[in-house]
């Protein structure tokens, strides 16, 4: 079943309901949304792009992003989302690797593609070429697609080399959306999805459940993340849902406290995409109230590995509330999750190993990369590369990516555990922990820290704080103050870059 059928269905019964907004301005109701997407589908067919063809989207968050996305799906083609923050050459590589015959771009980004030598047709959504779309008669219905046909070709963030194209099917998107209603949150017609995180990532498929019920879709005029703009739009629209990376939640909390904002109009913030430190989410809940839900997923199993409910994120009465808050919740309904050893054998509760997942939201493989597929999909299980433990109640606590684990004197040290402690010190804004080569122990622990404004590093104070909270061997042996931690386009700290900086410091 083509995922675009949900737009067809909702337009039939709620065609007059407002659908797309740019800020406070209504751009289209559901009938108009469906009509414009159907014209994109018809135009793509005229251009020779039909079922199975790849069409890239290199755009900032605009209402036309969703129109184009659904138009691609209605044509039976495959959307290839590209983060608008990437360099033109990086985007060009993805377009070429995907074999995309066309790319829709927003102003400024189309020029970057042309400069990078992209040979596929570039369509600026504010240009004359895109205006031709409106002249096409809309298709009558979404093209027939099988559940296992590709819908989204998502390229991983590429923190360890060239990104890989994750093949995401119509079945995967459907199961993810239906699972959302069971495990994450309810969506109502009067709700509004606010897209402040890149539509090229998880936010771009979290629109589906909002289309299903005919809720509103709001793109900020800035095209991205701005705390003041989010608070203003939430007040105006009310009942706002948004997806946010943990770094965005932290910034929103700090900005709200500084400006005296209470978060009026924010109904649900789903966070995921990186580690959320306990101190940060406690502060966020204390300020905004019980509006937060956590999910854990990967591009290879989008948004659908585990979830920690609104009640669990907000609860402070359970005897193990802090441990549960440090977890990523329990397996979502559509998947099985296990903790396995190096051979994939199930480990006992409480023992650390690789998080393994199987189910209908797991990818069939990587685009034209059999070797990577074989390494990642083993005996039907997705080997996530994340190290974690599962307790007797099914709560999964992530430690780190397996490649980020520090081994000192034969003992495993998980950087996240040390980072959690450092972040509870009032002088520390951010922390990134990595291993440093050591002639006797193999590795020892060092920390890169961002200090709060106006505060100088006091290594003795941080040492004492760590010794009060974790074992001595886990304490950082050195601290490096940096103005900010390097992050990828989705807000994840780049440990590989921190290790490179460490090499420069050590001159190795």
Image: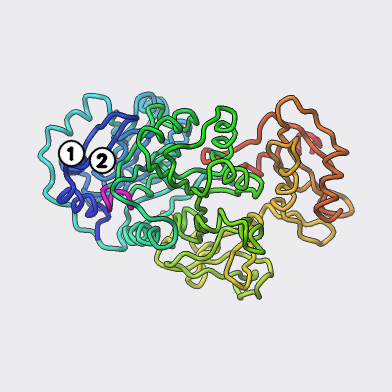
User: Viewer-proximal residue, 58 or 101?
Assistant: 58
Q: Residue at x 59, y 28 (%)?
A: 258
- Whether 111 is among the magenta residues is no
- Whether 210 is among the magenta residues is yes
Q: Quadrant of residue 148?
A: bottom left
Q: Quadrant of the N terminus?
A: bottom left
Q: Quadrant of the C terminus?
A: top right
Task: Describe the element under mark 2 as helix, strand or loop.
Answer: strand
Q: Residue at x 87, y 44 (%)?
A: 464
Do callouts 2 and 1 mark residues in contact (Cβ within 8 Å)? yes
Where residue 416 sits: x, y (%)?
Answer: 69, 51
Q: Which marked residue is nearer to the observer: mark 2 or mark 1? A: 2
Q: Is residue 126 left or right of residue 295?
A: left
Q: Residue at x 52, y 41 (%)?
A: 490
Residue underneath mark 2 = 19
Task: Please indicate, yes or no, whether residue 387 appears anywhere in the rendered image.
Answer: no
Residue underneath mark 1 = 32
Q: Which residues are magenta?
A: 208-214
Reply above or below: 338 against 43: below
User: Does label 2 or label 1 sit earlier along the sequence?
Assistant: 2
Reply above or below: 108 against 345: above
Give the distance between the C-alpha atoms of the residues marked 2 and 1, in whole angstroms. Answer: 8 Å
Q: Is residue 444 left or right of residue 153?
A: right
Where residue 442 sits: x, y (%)?
Answer: 83, 54
């Amino acid at each position: 079943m083509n995922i675009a059928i949900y737009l067809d269905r909702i337009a039939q019964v709620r065609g007059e309901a407002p659908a797309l907004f740019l800020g406070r301005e209504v751009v289209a109701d559901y009938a108009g949304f469906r009509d414009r997407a159907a014209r994109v589908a018809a135009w793509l067919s005229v251009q020779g792009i039909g079922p199975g063809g790849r069409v890239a989207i290199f755009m900032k968050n605009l209402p036309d992003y969703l129109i184009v996305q659904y138009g691609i799906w209605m044509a039976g083609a495959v959307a290839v989302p590209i983060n608008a923050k990437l360099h033109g050459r990086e985007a060009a590589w993805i377009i070429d690797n995907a074999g995309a015959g066309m790319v829709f771009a927003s102003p400024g980004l189309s020029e970057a593609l042309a400069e990078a030598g992209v040979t596929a047709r570039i369509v600026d959504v504010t240009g004359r070429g895109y205006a031709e779309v409106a002249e096409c008669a809309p298709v009558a219905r979404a093209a027939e697609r099988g559940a296992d046909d590709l819908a989204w070709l998502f390229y991983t963030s590429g923190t360890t080399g060239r990104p890989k194209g994750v093949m995401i099917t119509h079945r995967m998107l459907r199961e993810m959306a239906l699972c959302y209603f069971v495990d994450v949150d309810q969506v109502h017609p009067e709700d509004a999805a606010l897209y402040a995180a890149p539509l090229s990532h998880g936010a771009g498929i979290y629109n589906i459940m909002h289309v299903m019920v005919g809720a509103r879709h709001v793109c900020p005029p800035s095209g991205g993340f701005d705390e003041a703009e989010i608070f203003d739009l939430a007040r105006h629209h009310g009942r706002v849902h948004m997806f946010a990376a943990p770094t965005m939640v932290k910034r929103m909390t700090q900005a709200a406290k500084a400006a005296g904002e209470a978060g009026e109009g924010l109904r649900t913030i789903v966070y995921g995409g990186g580690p959320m430190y306990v101190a940060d989410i406690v502060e966020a809940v204390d300020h905004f109230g019980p509006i937060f839900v956590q999910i854990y997923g990967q591009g290879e199993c989008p948004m659908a590995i585990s979830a920690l409910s609104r009640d669990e994120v907000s609860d402070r009465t359970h005897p193990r509330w802090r441990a549960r808050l440090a977890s990523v919740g329990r397996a979502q309904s559509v998947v099985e999750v296990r903790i396995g050893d190096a051979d994939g054998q199930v480990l006992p509760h409480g023992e650390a190993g690789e998080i393994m997942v199987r189910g209908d939201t797991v990818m069939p493989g990587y685009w034209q990369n059999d070797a990577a597929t074989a390494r990642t999909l083993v005996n039907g299980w997705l080997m996530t590369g994340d190290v974690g433990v599962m307790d007797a109640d099914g709560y999964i606590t992530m430690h780190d990516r397996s490649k980020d684990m520090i081994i000192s004197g034969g003992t495993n040290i998980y950087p996240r555990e040390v980072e959690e402690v450092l972040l509870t010190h009032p002088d520390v804004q951010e922390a990134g922990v990595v291993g440093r080569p050591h002639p006797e122990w193999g590795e020892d622990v060092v920390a890169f820290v961002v200090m709060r404004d106006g505060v100088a590093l006091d290594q003795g104070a941080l040492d004492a704080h760590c010794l009060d909270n974790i074992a001595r061997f886990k304490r950082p042996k050195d601290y490096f103050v940096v103005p900010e931690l390097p992050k990828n386009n989705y807000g994840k700290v780049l440990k590989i870059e921190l290790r490179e900086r460490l090499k420069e410091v050590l001159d190795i």
